């Protein structure tokens, strides 16, 4: 008995251990939410697209329109999350959006008309924006209060986890002869299975906190650099989505190999999992905006490689650079926005997400139209790479301006 009592941890250490597990559980809950709504809900369209196009004869223009509908919904969702008096708690919107995302993903396997596809992907886009904004705000708020922002990369890793898992599932199902409808339904089921876990791991807001209140518009001060950062995020959305939407279809067109299609998309997901930690460390060393610019340049190289280097080597390089940067850029953008406007976090997150969504709406429409007319992935890839280079230039210039002595003390005028 004495030995058992002596081996028990001191009460203070037990409390610290409990808090540590609570913070890890919170980050895991956020990770699962992003895996469901983003990794699967938003991105599973890419590995399913080739089978879906073969099954119902989708042109690249039609495929681009379906993708753009999802991004238009994402854009609207971001605007809605910025409403100053959105009723209800952040957790309720987070969980409800997870359910809506899983339901619309399943619906893609039930219907077979363009209007239905457009509506379902639009609603799914709204849901994914709600999950990203509210889950990120819930998780980052609590981690910052606990002094555990080092766990933020675990939250953002969810997108890569969802991409890798759904890519592997789609490949395994296709190897067994499963049709495109079942691909949607099975991945939707996986997406829905994590919702109870998210409800268990992510607690609600503190009752003393106003649910979703925001300062009146008249009391908000303009935030230096936030507008330019939003422009960067819009260019990023336009540039990356060209490859994110059509990479697997381009691989099928260039090589005809289904096994390579699966490998390419799984590589995107695996590369995305550690990317937020890697780019987070880069952001702490050289600043969020300089790291953001560098990541955009690396992603531009990957987007260009996907279009100019047909075949396995180019596709895999594009997959590594795309997966290794796009969530890092997203996380760095949120970190920079939070630093620029700490008192307007939800509004700044929503502004960034809306700009990102606007870029994504234009990207697949333009790319699909160009691919149908040029029968090549090269031109849209180069346009996407140019957008990323422009975003990098603006981010680096903004970082230099904010670093000047007369601006360094305040990000808000």
Image (cartoon, rainbow, N blue to C red):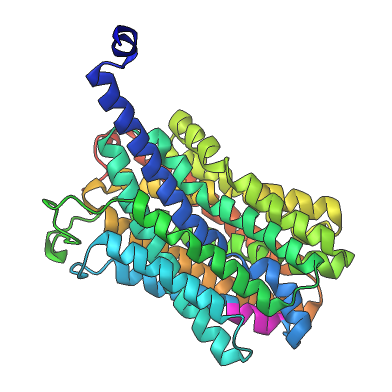
**Which residue reaches farthest front?**
1
366 in relation to 215, above or below: below
Dominant SS in magenta: helix
Say if the magenta span includes residue 63: yes
When the figure is inspected, residue 291 is found, relative to residue 44, above or below; the finding is: above
Along the viewing direction, whichever of 46 and 242 lies nearer the viewer: 46
Residue under the point 23% across and 20% down? 11
Image: 17 above or below 227: above
Q: What is the x, y in percent for residue 389?
A: 60, 53
Asked if the magenta segment contains residue 120, the reply would be no
Image quadrant in which the N terminus is located: top left
Residue at the image position 62 percent from the left and 92 percent from the top = 113
Q: As drawn, is 312 to the left or to the right of 345?
A: right
Q: Where does residue 10 sit, x and y in percent of width and height? A: 26, 16
Q: Which is more toward the observer, 71 or 287?
A: 71
- Give the side of residue 54 with respect to residue 266, left or right: right
Q: Quadrant of residue 406?
A: top left
Tell me which segment is drawn in magenta. 60-66
Residue 15, visible in the rendered structure:
yes
Is residue 324 among what the camera can see? no
- Image vertical order of residue 83 relative to residue 400, above or below: below
């Amino acid at each position: 008995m004495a030995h058992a009592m002596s081996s028990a941890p001191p009460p203070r250490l037990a409390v610290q251990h409990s808090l540590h597990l609570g913070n890890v559980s919170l980050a895991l809950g956020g990770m699962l939410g992003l895996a469901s709504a983003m990794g699967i809900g938003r991105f599973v369209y890419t590995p399913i697209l080739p089978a879906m196009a073969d099954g119902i004869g989708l042109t690249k223009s039609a495929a681009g329109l379906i993708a753009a509908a999802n991004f238009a919904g994402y854009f609207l969702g971001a605007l809605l999350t910025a409403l100053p008096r959105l009723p209800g708690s952040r957790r309720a919107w987070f969980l409800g959006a997870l359910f809506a995302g899983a339901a619309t993903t399943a619906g893609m396997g039930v219907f077979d008309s363009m209007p239905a596809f457009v509506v379902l992907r639009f609603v799914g886009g709204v849901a994914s924006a709600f999950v990203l904004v509210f889950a990120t705000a819930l998780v980052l708020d609590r981690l910052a209060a606990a002094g555990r922002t080092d766990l933020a990369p675990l939250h953002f890793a969810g997108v890569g986890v969802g991409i890798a898992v759904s890519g592997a599932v789609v490949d395994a199902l296709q190897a067994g002869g499963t049709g495109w409808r079942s691909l949607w339904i099975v991945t939707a089921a996986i997406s829905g299975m994590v919702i109870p876990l998210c409800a268990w791991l992510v607690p609600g807001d503190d009752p003393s906190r106003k649910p979703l209140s925001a300062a009146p518009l008249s009391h908000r001060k303009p935030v230096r650099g936030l507008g330019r950062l939003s422009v960067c995020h819009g260019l990023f959305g336009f540039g990356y989505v060209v490859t994110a939407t059509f990479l697997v279809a381009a691989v099928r067109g260039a090589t005809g190999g289904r096994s390579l299609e699966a490998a390419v998309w799984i590589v995107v997901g695996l590369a995305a999992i550690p990317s937020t930690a890697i780019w987070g460390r880069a952001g702490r060393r050289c600043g969020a905006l300089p790291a953001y610019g560098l990541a955009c340049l690396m992603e531009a190289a990957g987007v260009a490689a996907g279009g100019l280097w047909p075949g396995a080597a180019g596709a895999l390089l594009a997959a590594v650079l795309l997966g290794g940067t796009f969530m890092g850029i997203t996380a760095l953008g949120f970190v920079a926005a939070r630093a620029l406007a700490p008192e307007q976090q939800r509004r700044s997150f929503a502004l960034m997400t809306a700009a990102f969504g606007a870029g994504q709406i234009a990207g697949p429409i333009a790319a699909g139209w160009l691919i149908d007319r040029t029968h090549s992935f090269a031109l849209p890839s180069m346009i996407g790479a140019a957008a990323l280079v422009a975003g990098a230039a603006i981010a680096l210039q903004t970082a230099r301006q904010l670093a000047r002595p007369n601006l360094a003390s305040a990000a808000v005028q």
